[in-house]
Structure formats: structure tokens, C-alpha cells
Image (cartoon, rainbow, N blue to C red):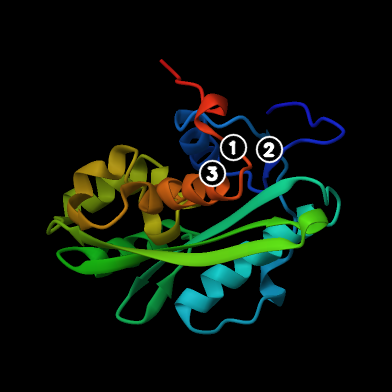
């Protein structure tokens, strides 16, 4: 984790290694400072609104401490048949989730929020991606559960990890499924003059 300076320009308010990886791959220079909000106090509403509310709460939490910085908050949820799938707490829960997703199309919703209190600027949005799973055999499900990859992932899978073999096709943003719609985030930061092409470095 990068050392937090007195006035970091951009802060990622998330401990997710996947979001950190995505922003680094996009050439962004930023500091990581995870928010510690208690998500149980965020009222559950329509999935799109709920994901966005979680992201806003995380961004706002860090922005209060560093009002001069641009803070990025995000939250990803998996939705199938109007049911939100969180992170499985046990093998049994992971098994139920993967069986439900098998052979079906589900939605991955990532709410993101970017704010700078000093400039009185805030933008929030929810991006949706459709994901189609292959038909999974019981042996495939058990193998994947035993890799332990499902246990800190919404919906019990990681598209960027071993779980890539579960996914037959996607419609929409791939990075959104990983955890952050990078295209939309970068577009906003450029539009606001936070970054320019000369401040994005290639990670070769």
C-alpha cells in the first residue's frame, strides 16, 4: 500500500486488491485508504440504488478526512432473479450460489462515487454488466469451492481468477465485473481536469 501523503490527489477508498490493480493497470497514480463504514447501516433498496449508496458512503467517509482530494468509492453486487448474492460465509452458501448461477444469466452491478468536498463536486453512478455462466457440473462446483477463491467474492466467483472458466459470455464492461468500471471513472476524472493524458503512465 502506498504511503498516504498530507494531501493526496486521488484516493481509492477501498481495500479491494482488484480495484487497486485495475487503476494501476490504467496508469493512474493514487493512494489507497479503505473506508471502514458499517454497511449494515445503509438501507437496502433497489439494487442499483443500494450499490450506489454504498459507494457514496465509502467515498464520503474518506472525503471528510481529506476534503482537498478526489476520492473514489465503489461497491459491487451480484443480482439474479432480483436476489442479491453477497459473499458466501461457508462452503454450503458458495455451493448454493454457484448452483443458482449455473447456466443462467445474472447481472453484476457496480456503484461508484467520486467526490471532492473542497470543490463541492460529487458524481455517482451504477454500471450493469450481464454475465452468462456455463452449465456447471457438481464436480466443477466442488473443485472451485475447494480453491477457496469464492469466499471473499460477491456471487462466489472471480471472473479475473480461476473463476474465468465459469463464464461463457458477458455483455457490457469487463472491468465492472472485476469491481470497477474503469472507463467511466477515467472519463470523469479527465472531464473534471483531475488527470490528463500526460499524467497517465503506461505500466509495461
CA separation in Å, label 1 and label 3: 5 Å
Q: In the rendered image, which residue does mark 3 sit on?
A: 190
In the shown orientation, is residue 114 left or right of residue 91?
right
In the shown orientation, is residue 21 left or right of residue 97?
right
Q: Earlier in the sequence, mark 2 or mark 3?
A: 2
Q: Nearer the viewer, residue 112 or 98?
A: 112
| Residue 161 position within the rendered picture, expressed as x and y whole percent measured from the top left | 34, 38
The 10 Å Cα crowd at callout 1, few under 14, some 14 to 19, many 20 or more, is: some
Quadrant where the N terminus sits is top right
Helix, strand or loop at mark 1: loop
Q: Nearer the viewer, residue 53 or 195?
A: 195
Q: In the rendered image, which residue does mark 1 sit on?
A: 195
Q: Residue at x 27, y 57 (%)?
A: 172
Q: Residue at x 38, y 47 (%)?
A: 175
Q: Residue at x 40, y 43 (%)?
A: 149
185 to 162, vertically: above or below? below
The 10 Å Cα crowd at callout 2, few under 14, some 14 to 19, many 20 or more, is: many
Q: Nearer the viewer, mark 1 or mark 2?
A: 1
| Residue 22 position within the rendered picture, expressed as x and y whole percent measured from the top left | 46, 37
- Specify the quadrant of the image occupied by residue 113: bottom right
CA separation in Å, label 1 and label 2: 17 Å
Quadrant where the C terminus sits is top left
Amino acid at each position: 500500500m502506498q504511503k498516504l501523503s498530507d494531501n493526496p490527489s486521488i484516493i481509492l477508498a477501498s481495500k479491494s486488491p482488484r480495484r487497486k490493480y485495475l487503476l494501476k493497470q490504467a496508469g493512474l497514480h493514487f493512494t489507497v485508504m479503505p473506508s471502514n463504514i458499517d454497511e449494515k447501516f445503509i438501507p437496502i433498496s433497489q439494487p442499483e440504488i443500494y450499490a450506489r449508496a454504498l459507494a457514496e458512503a465509502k467515498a464520503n467517509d474518506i472525503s471528510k478526512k481529506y476534503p482537498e482530494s478526489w476520492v473514489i468509492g465503489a461497491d459491487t453486487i451480484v443480482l439474479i432473479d432480483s436476489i442479491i448474492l453477497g459473499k458466501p460465509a461457508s462452503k454450503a452458501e458458495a455451493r448454493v450460489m454457484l448452483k443458482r448461477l449455473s447456466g443462467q444469466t445474472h447481472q453484476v452491478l457496480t456503484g461508484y462515487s467520486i467526490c471532492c468536498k473542497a470543490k463541492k463536486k460529487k458524481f455517482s453512478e451504477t454500471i450493469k454488466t450481464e454475465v452468462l455462466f456455463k452449465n456447471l457440473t457438481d464436480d466443477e462446483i466442488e473443485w472451485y469451492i475447494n480453491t477457496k477463491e469464492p469466499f471473499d467474492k460477491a456471487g462466489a466467483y472471480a471472473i479475473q481468477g480461476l473463476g474465468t472458466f465459469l463464464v461463457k459470455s458477458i455483455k457490457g464492461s469487463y472491468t465492472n465485473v472485476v469491481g470497477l468500471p474503469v472507463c467511466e471513472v477515467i472519463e470523469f476524472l479527465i472531464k473534471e481536469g483531475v488527470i490528463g493524458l500526460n499524467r497517465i503512465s503506461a505500466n509495461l
